[in-house]
Image (spheres, rainbow, N blue to C red):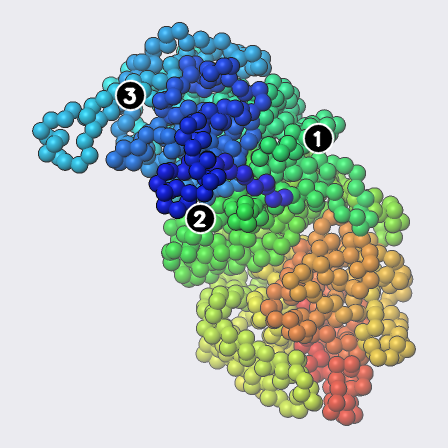
Amino acid sequence: MKSPKPQRSARIVSPSAIACGTSLPLLSLVWVLLTVFPWSTLMAQNQPPGNQPPGNQFPGGRFPGVTGPGNNSSPPQEYFIAMEFYRAGELDRALDGFDVALRRTRVDAAGRWVDSIPVYAMLAETQYQLGDLESAMRSLDQLFAIVARNRGWMARPLWRDLNNTGNVAVTPPRYLWQAARRFNRIPLPSEISFVRGQVIDEAAIAAGGAIESQNIRRLNVVEVLRGIAIANYRRRIIMGELARLDSGPQQCLEATKFPAGLNVPIAKVMIGAMRGCERFGAGQDEMAVKDSVQFGLLQGRIHPLTPIANLASASAVAATAKPDQALQQAIAAANQAGAEDQLEFVGEAMMLAAGCSTAQTAKAVQAAASEIAAALIRESRLASAQCLLASVDAAITAGDLAYATQRLQDAGAMLSRRDMVVPRLRSYMAYLSARLATRQPYAASGNPMPWQKPLGAMFAFATDHKVRNRGLISMPRLYQLARLNQIIASTKDTGSIDDLLATYADPPSIAVWRRDATDALAGQVANRDRLRVARLSTAFARNNAPDAMLRIEQLQQGRVTQPLALGGRLLQANAVTRMPGPMLLPKDLQWRNTADALVRNLSAAQLAAANQPKQQIAPEQAAANYGKLISQTWAMALDRNEIPTVVPKPLDEKKPLGEIPDKTGLLIYLRDGGFYHAILATKEKATIWSIKGGPRIDADIANLLRTVGVGTKKKPRLPTDDAWRQQAMSLRDRLIPPDTGPILQGVLAKVERLVVIPDSRLWYLPFELLPTDDASSELLGDAVSLSYAATPALALSPTAAPPQDHHIGIALGRFFAPRDMEHDAAIAKSITDVLPAGQWVEIPNGYAIPSSRSGEVANHLIVGQVTTPKAGALLRTALIPSDTSQPLGTFEDWLGPPPRVPSSVFLSGFRCYLDTGQPPLGSEIMATIAQLQYSGVRDVVLSRWALGGQSTATLIQEYGQELPFASALEAFDRARQILRGSVLDPTGEPTLLGDDLEGVMLSGDQPFFWSSYLMSTPLN
């Protein structure tokens, strides 16, 4: 959902500008109006409803101090008027107001004076709420520059004037709710004296430069201190974990030390509270929490810096294992902000409290937020709407859906006003609408899921926010990732920030979820590939093979999950609830057993469904059952849970090689620009090397495949000699260094089982074809047991339990003899005739279900049809043609809840991009294997290029009849050996044309027929 374009008010135009050619009548009129009638006078005529000051007196009680600022106040009066528009939610007008106020601040020879600090702080707040984080950071940069340039300014105010309260009144406003009335405010004047300049003597004159004679001016020091505190708080929210690299807050700490000899208690506690916010901005969370306790109160009474200091402290505690403490502090900060009439932070504090709430504590947050929302409806529409949405958030967590539904409608009506320009708040409302929709009944009948539309609106602001067609970074997590990418691009050594890269390469932490769930979701779906590549480069630079293996796993896993729903978060929510306990790590099983009721109930339902007997479920019942499980899984994924990554099973970070079985090797490749990096890992050691000339290797693979008959239009297609062996040997020498002799006595000595983990176009290369010595020597596929894997973790560990029975689901189409229907049907019958009687079923003819639900009736799925991955939209691919007309019929539906997937899948007609004419990438093979295994499939067999004909029928026949008696790997190996030893009629192979048909018989040992197929199966 694109936010409304801010309608900016007229700008002040100088007479010189008009004289220089801009003397349009309308522009001249604007200048005259703004000259004769000050901007503040014009704005006062358009005050937000309920906020007009009586007569000509400004409502000074709304800000620190109670006496109203005069026309020459510092900060200027326009600042306070703009603040009223901010509180009313009219952020476009507030933006213009703070811009005008900035022009009214004082400027000397060194630049802007400290009275512009509050203006810059609130200008940044407005830009943040409008979703323009880059502009907000520029405003904060200006503020920090002013603080640093005026180092030592805090020794200039006459702090004792703070004790001169005169006739200041501290009567609580009438709109205050009961909890806020309990706090006692310290009465303070709105302005105190401030000493500027210096005594002009001979030394000053000799020093030269700009000289200002000593004078005394009035300054709202309290608002300046609060502006610095606000700026540091917001800076930390935007910068997140990058705060430790941010010099701005650290400069503030250095420039705002306690003045020497300060003995005014109220000044001490306000400065201390401000410095606590500075510590929070600098990432010193523990010190920030201590400062909020030490300087938050003075003799049991609050002061103007108490609310923001307590809010910063609550945000710091939210990152710890004490969410209940953060919740209490956030509610206290909201009440304190109300008592101090700082309504701009009441709603944010309550939203933080809602983010930290659990099912046990959410009711209290709901009640408090609801009470505040009602109290502030006439005083601050922004704060009221924020509190109303916070109460909805808490109500959903508490399970009070009736209240949440009603109040969400109320909030929608409020935010739909044309004068309320609050895009960030609308995004939060869209997130809550999606959460609420997942709690409503849903039937998986092919209709759009009701939470998809509000999620789309949320992500429109979070990841695609535009104003006047200019793309803006609206979310802190995305801003942080952009900053990290800039750092990576500007430095060759990323080792110094490796721990930060590791933090951001992982999904957002629970701290991010508690502070802002929309920010966490934006970070979840963000592409973090560059960060992972930078970490991998560090490991290769250190020649650390085990560490590189771990980082390749993280990189490849991220590439597979990033396109998935919620960046793979839905996948993990489904996996952790469906997987049997013995397959989970102890800490993940404990998390599931101690999670909230939604997670526990969903897991019980998932495990019960997996244990049901093989049977077809009536479509209406299946839609209802699946709809309930789907909505519950989405609810879990959208809730503030730190869902563990269980698919695939994480590698042991300390000893990743220890999980490799004896006499087994992992041959891992990764494409990096023009290079391929390679790792050969065994249980004993890991070796790492780099291979230059990536494009040349790609070309050599294409040449080898053309030689064996793939992707060529030459006739005959099949080779008439063994020239391909020489090409394969040349590739082997580049990909697997021969060392000092034959590879089986060299780099692959003692390796009996080899798992190849290719990358990029290496997926198109059948490694089985590589000779082990000279060109005429034994092939690698014959010398060792060879299989493939998408990632190291998938090579080592399964994603589902082994099958308890061996029912086979088979989906056959016009694939074997597409030009002859009768012959094709005869071949299909010959396949089913050899399958074990009573242990197979045809899909969809036998059971009208999509392939994603084939696990309901079978533990093995064999597809004898063409499967063509959609270029650029792999998840929208249908594995069998009939899937296109059924609900849950796309590849994406395999990955989501709740379909029961089979234990093994054989895609005998899979066509990679090399076979379809698409730009060859290789990622379509890797993603297909990985995503099938992520869904719960243990064993995957697929073809690189589709063949059909008698050769494929032979392979399927032998594979299918072996499945009940052997593992999928053993069945596949035996079936391929039989194919290689068979004699094929060329007229029965639809891929052969022309001269290929003139031969009497062909050998199945031609690489064109058997090397197309690859298998991926876990070692352990």
Q: Earlier in the sequence, mark 1 or mark 2?
A: 1
Q: Amino acid at mark 3?
A: Arg
Dot 1 lies on which element? Answer: helix
Depth check: 15 or 89 in front? 15
- 187 left or right of 781? left
Percent of width and height locating residue 910:
72, 69
Residue identifier under label 1 = 409
Dot 2 lies on which element? Answer: helix
Mark 2 closeness class: few <14, some 14–19, many ≥20 residues within 10 Å: some
Label 3 and label 1: CA atoms lie apart by: 50 Å
Depth check: 204 or 749 in front? 204
Q: Assess whether mark 1 and mark 3 are in contact (beta carbons under 8 angstroms).
A: no
Please identify, in this view, whether the residue under mark 3 or under mark 1 is nearer the observer: 3
Up the image or down, 1011 lies above or below 370; here it is below
Please identify, in this view, whether the residue under mark 1 or under mark 2 is nearer the observer: 1
Dividing the picture into quadrants, the one containing residue 773 is: bottom right
Residue identifier under label 2 = 483
Q: Assess whether mark 3 and mark 2 are in contact (beta carbons under 8 angstroms).
A: no
Label 1 and label 2: CA atoms lie apart by: 38 Å
**Residue 118: in sight, yes or no?**
yes
Residue 151: which numbered mark, if any? none
Residue identifier under label 3 = 217
Percent of width and height locating residue 476:
50, 42
Label 2 and label 3: CA atoms lie apart by: 41 Å
Percent of width and height locating residue 822:
90, 77
Total numbered labels: 3
Up the image or down, 167 lies above or below 917; here it is above
- 539 left or right of 849? left
Q: State the residue at coordinates (58%, 82%).
A: 703
Q: State the residue at coordinates (59%, 40%).
A: 4
Q: Amino acid at mark 1?
A: Gln
Q: Earlier in the sequence, mark 2 or mark 3?
A: 3
